[in-house]
Image (cartoon, grey):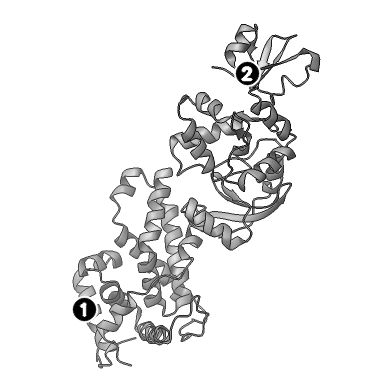
Amino acid sequence: MSVSTADLKRLGEVKAPAGLAERVLAGAGLADEYARFDTVIGAVFVAWNRNGVSAAARSRSAAEFEEYFRAEVRRPLLPGTPPAAMEHRISDELSGKRNLRFDLRGLTEFEQAVLRKAREIPYGQVRPYSWVAREIGHPSAVRAVGTALANNPIPYFIPCHRVVRADGVIGNYGGGGPEAKKAILSLEGVRVQQLAELARAGVRYQGVKTTGVYCYPTCHHGRRALERNVVWLHDADEAKAAGFRPCKVCRPAA
Amino acid sequence: MDGVEHVFERMVHDHQDRLYALGYALTGNRHDAEEVAQDTLLRAYRALVRYPPERVRELKQRAWLHRIAVNVARNRYRRPGPRLVELNGSEQDAAPGPEARALQRVELDAVAAALACLPERYREAVVLRCVQDLSYAEAAEVLGQPVGTVKSNVHRGLRLLRGENDERFDS
């Protein structure tokens, strides 16, 4: 056959097949990979890369998860075989042991600070949004904290579900709505109903007469007190007036 | 470290099509083209992580990647054993398009196959100059040959492709 220079030019305009970039980046250890894990909270799709876990969602299908990942994280993603220890680490993480690493690149400093702070909340405990805002040094940015938590790319593992509204409303939840949030908290042993009733009654803190310390109601340092020694407190001023000091672990006041 | 990763991600994004086209034109088939593009980019990554930052910054990416790709492709077609030449669309198409596109594919396969029949030195020169649209100077740099040599190789390669006889043709 006779080949013209126009033919050659057209040959130069072919496009690489779909997935080539992903395979290259995965080969270099730069692409994110994902797999489905069966956990205590059901099937969860988890994405990871060499920096750590980068996203999680209880998607109904792999396709749905890929779509979520590309929209949220905006990096190439391939199905992969998880590193050997990953299955263990994932179930550990969901039962309160913290040994996963996370990749939060792509989030702002503020969002990262919020998520890191949320991760400090122990398993089975909750803190109000205002606590997160105060702890990261932006006490008036309560709403922004809510937004950052709502956009948490790694729910369940970065426990944004442990941040609740101070007025007893459970608050919205990116990982599946308020009902899912309640379910996960209940699974962790939080008495959600009781907590909501206390909050609605205006009770924020629990003081223990024998120690003179007051805590958030779910703080594990207050839970061993006998019921007759417990005083329910509405705010920090009331606590102070009654001679209580804030717990140094759950830090209910600045 | 993070900087190199970012540079590389951009490089993959910017050059994957060009490198695939280069591999396709040099090897004559889509399967090898994909492997050439992948191997080239992975080699590039392994080199990038060892380069000092100023070298990464000043890199002429296009020429550099083309030079790597030409070497990768040479390793493939110089390898002893049977060579895969032409499958004429028998491979799976990831996204089968309309008939017009399928036809175009067959035509492109024929062009690539015709190139694959050229002697190596003509083929490389023609591919870099006419398929990849590099300047003679760039092509000469990629091939490590004088510009004059590249020009005459392009010229002879094109004559062969047009079906004209070249008495100096010595495959």
Residue beneath disc 2: A234
**Residue under the point 23% across and 73% down:** B150
Q: Residue A86 carries which label?
A: none
- Secondary structure, mark 2, is loop
Image coordinates for residue A111, horizontal then vertical, percent: 48, 37
Point out the frontmost of discs 1 and 2: 2
> Which quadrant of the view contains residue A215?
top right
- Where is B85 relative to A233, above or below? below
> Which quadrant of the view contains residue A205?
top right
Q: The residue marked by circle 2 belongs to what chain?
A: A
Q: Along the line of sight, which residue is nearer the eye, A86 or B74?
A: A86
Residue beneath disc 1: B152
The three-letter amino acid code for the residue at tag 1 is Ser
Q: In which quarter of the image is the N terminus of chain A?
A: bottom left
Q: Do labels 1 and 2 share a chain?
A: no
- Where is A233 relative to B58, above or below? above
